[in-house]
Image (cartoon, rainbow, N blue to C red):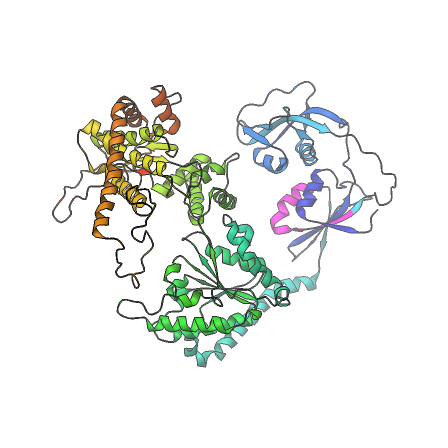
Amino acid sequence: MSSTIQSLSFAQFREKWDQGLVYRDDAKFPLKVTTQDSAYNAVITGYLRNSPERGPGEEPGTKPIRATVRTQDVPAILGQSVAFRLTSEAAPAPGVETVELSEAGFRQAAALGEIKSLDSKGPLTVYSPDGNLAVIVANREIPPTPAAPADPKGAGPKQFKVIAPVMMLGEELGKLLNDNGIYEANNDFLKSAIFTFLPVLLIVLLLFFLFRQQMKAAGRGAMSFGKSKARLLTRDHNKVTFKDVAGIQEAKEELWEIVDFLRDPRKFQKLGGSIPKGVLMVGPPGTGKTLLARAIAGEADVPFFSISGSDFVEMFVGVGASRVRDMFEQGKKHAPCLIFIDEIDAVGRHRGHGMGGGHDEREQTLNQLLVEMDGFDTQEGVIIIAATNRPDVLDPALLRPGRFDRQVTVSLPDVNGREEILRVHVKKIKLAPGTDLGIIARGTPGFSGAELANLINEAALLAARRGLSAVTIAEMEEARDKVRWGRERRSLAMSDKEKTGTAWHEAGHAYLNMVLPHTHPLHKVTIIPRGPYLGATMYLPDGDKYSTQRKEALANLVMTMGGRIAESFITGDVSNGASGDIRQATSLARHMVCEWGMSDKLGMIEYGDGDNPVFLARDVSRSRNYSEDTARVIDAEIKRFIDEAYDHATEVLTTNKDKVELIANALLEYETLDASHIRDLIETGEMKNPPSAPKPPPVPDEFRKKPAAKPTEDKPDDGGPLPGEVVGAPA
């Protein structure tokens, strides 16, 4: 018998119990449960076998078995090592040699890894016709009994000890042990008194301490106005590590040396090196800049001060500078630590610019911040991290070496990063087995981490409204469409004429998208109103797009023109439905001519300053860097690109008007078609697997159709929503 006592967690103890390795009804090796009157834990002591005890009929070999357990217990019993599928079919009748296992016997077999599927190539089948009780029909493979060790020393029963919280596991513990354990109550009156009066004593001491601090600060309340508003997040407050941050691997790698410095500053100091004093994280909103800063503090296990740039600026001049000084003093007291300034552009804007003069308070605060960053030493272990999505408006003095001398770009995640982010967020919801998050990742180009988190939340809410037990891929795709393009507006009252025009409009886009080379793959077409659109043709690239070829841009122009042309086939007129298409086509053609050098007449010269954000205080007026003659040539080239695309689209659609009509009629019938449906209509004239007929949800009485208000002089008709739009991944 081993003299050492092995400490087990309750989960480990439960696993040993299920495997039959715990002595139960044996006077020589008793199982004891000790409880105390005022304690919250029970102490379980006992002995472990070296191998499970086999009963009659449990000889080595493979035997068919059958067991009945509660359906909700199946995942916990089988664990992650056994793949299974749940079906509502009735279980097959037991065979002659089938062994009926009790729940305890089945738990033991599953814990020992002896449960195998009847079909070794497929998953285990779990039959649950009523959803309450599950029947498992499988094979049980009992391995041969291992030979006894040559040296029996140390091979006897081993004593163990388990501490289990009674409040959480009392019911499960009683059900598990039943009559197999010896229960003992330890009545320690001194310990009971401590557990009873200690909380009251601590509360009294805390109130006394707070009252004393208030008395000390009573005479200097006005002086606290200049104190820093930075919130200190301690080591145990919502700790975040790099495991909670996904999709920005390069930024994590670049910031890892800061974690190394905070963990062991002497490794850098003994070689004369110094860590950057300040790190500026730049990226679009929602990409995880604040989360990444918290992860650095969590990995380094140091205090974390968080403050917003707007917290420094007050009505009174000098308050912001005072708060900057106090913030750095607090940081030095808690060194090594991190100070995170979010939205630093609120206080760090370029000095000397402004409409009607500068802002004295903000400039004084910025001056003090520059002095403090230049004055404190990195050997003190205080590192400043700031975040902004407008680095172009920051003062150059902030970005020079010695201050924020390192910039880390936190960009939008690629397809692999989006899949990692989705895997982080789906841990918070109940996801249906077999859901492929890669499909959602490929279908969300341009999404930030915050938008992906919103997508997961919307999918969970949608599944709850539908009464589902888990979130499936259908809810994920519906949530993606809702986040990107808006919610379906099935209650919108549309006339048959408008609906027919929208169907032909989208059919023109869809047909050109399928037949033209160099276009992105079609995703789906719908005439269900979403957001500001009455219909949409959605395309998704095969992967993330970081560049645009000239052939792709020209094909996109032709596809964009197809909506108005196809709509005119059925209406004999033009409408405002192509306003979004015209806007997209004009923007794309202007990029081709002015920025991408795709015009043979104008060549590889950039005209204009592109789409850089405007800082009004600095860019009140922009001088044009080309002449009037060049401007006329630019306009002519843009019009030529669009006119040629329009003529090409007219030729293709006129030649294949019958196929466009097939697509439009199918849209009127089914409202939404996938790319496979469009391909079938173009190639064979009919759909092999047509979608199910649409079943719009009931409209509440207060939202039922009402007479439309006539335009008046005070409230003119603005044209309403856009009848159609080509939507896809942003360039």
Q: Nearer the viewer, residue 246 or 68?
A: 246
Name the residue: 37% across, 34% down: 519
Q: Identify the image quadrant of residue 463.
A: top left
Q: Identify the image quadrant of residue 506.
A: top left
Residue projecting furthest to the left: 713
Q: Nearer the viewer, residue 221 or 373?
A: 373
Tell me the quadrant of the picture where the C terminus can be found: top left
Q: Identify the image quadrant of residue 135.
A: top right
Residue 133 position (above or below residue 586) = above
Magenta span = 159-179
Describe residue 632's horizontal placement relative to residue 343 as left or right: left
Residue 245 position (above or below residue 188) = above
Image location (x, y in percent) of residue 475: 43, 37
Describe residue 214's horizontal placement relative to residue 164 as left or right: left
Name the residue: 60% across, 60% down: 260
Image location (x, y in percent) of residue 290: 47, 57
Image location (x, y in percent) of residue 268: 61, 64
Q: How many marks?
A: 0
Tell whether position 605 is magenta: no
